[in-house]
Amino acid sequence: MTLDILRRELKKRGQRITYQRELILKIFMESENAHFGAEEIYRLLLEKRSRISKATVYRTLALLADFGILNKIEFGDGIVRYELASFDGKSHNHLICKICGKVVEFESDKLDELMETISKETGYRIENYQVKFYGICPDCFKKILRNDDNQKIASESVK
Ligand SMILES: [Zn+2]
Ligand SMILES: [Zn+2]
């Protein structure tokens, strides 16, 4: 994704890229798999010493979502997050760690096939879909295993 693409997409919708919009969109472009809530965007802007008020961040994110430049997305923790919309019409799905909140995206031909099967069975013309898998990421799982080991060692040394 480049700023030019975003500028063009905004223009198509009769909008232009303002200073604030550009700063916020750059944050999404700079990080891979960016799924940010307004508070996080505000914090990242502060780190860059950008002086944008929290109210402007909230308003700009909502506007960009209305324009279809950002997608609104929720992962069940009550935080409204945003991500850059994909303009290629492809569906992407999310793996969400319920411990650290890490989000990973994936695509799957098998899910595309499943969509077609269900479309045929139900007669629905399905346009897109989004699958969310909730669970524990490998890093958190390793930590859990390590803690279990430590506890085992601790209880054995008591014996
Ligand atoms: Zn995790
Ligand atoms: Zn995503």
Image (tube, grey):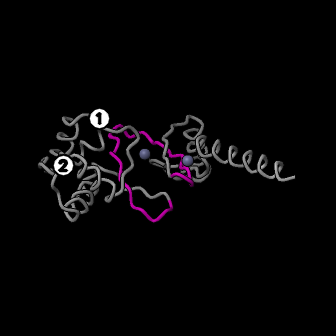
Answer few, some or many: residues within 10 Å of disc 2's Cα (few below 14, many 20 plus, some between 14 and 19): few
Task: First in sequence, mark 2 or 1: give its number.
Answer: 1
Q: Residue at x 27, y 48 (%)?
A: 69
Q: Position of residue 36 (x, y in %)?
A: 36, 52
Q: Residue at x 35, y 37 (%)?
A: 88
Q: Position of residue 77 (x, y in %)?
A: 49, 62
* Image-based side of 1 in relation to 33, left or right: left
Answer few, some or many: residues within 10 Å of disc 1's Cα (few below 14, many 20 plus, some between 14 and 19): few
Looking at the rendering, the stretch of residues picked out in magenta corresponds to 76-100
Q: Position of residue 130 (x, y in %)?
A: 49, 49
Q: Which residue is mark 1?
A: 1
Q: Which residue is mark 2?
A: 49
Does residue 82 lie above or below 141 as drawn?
Answer: below
Quadrant for residue 84, please give it: top left
Q: Residue at x 58, y 38 (%)?
A: 113
* Amino acid on which the number 2 mark rests in the picture: Arg
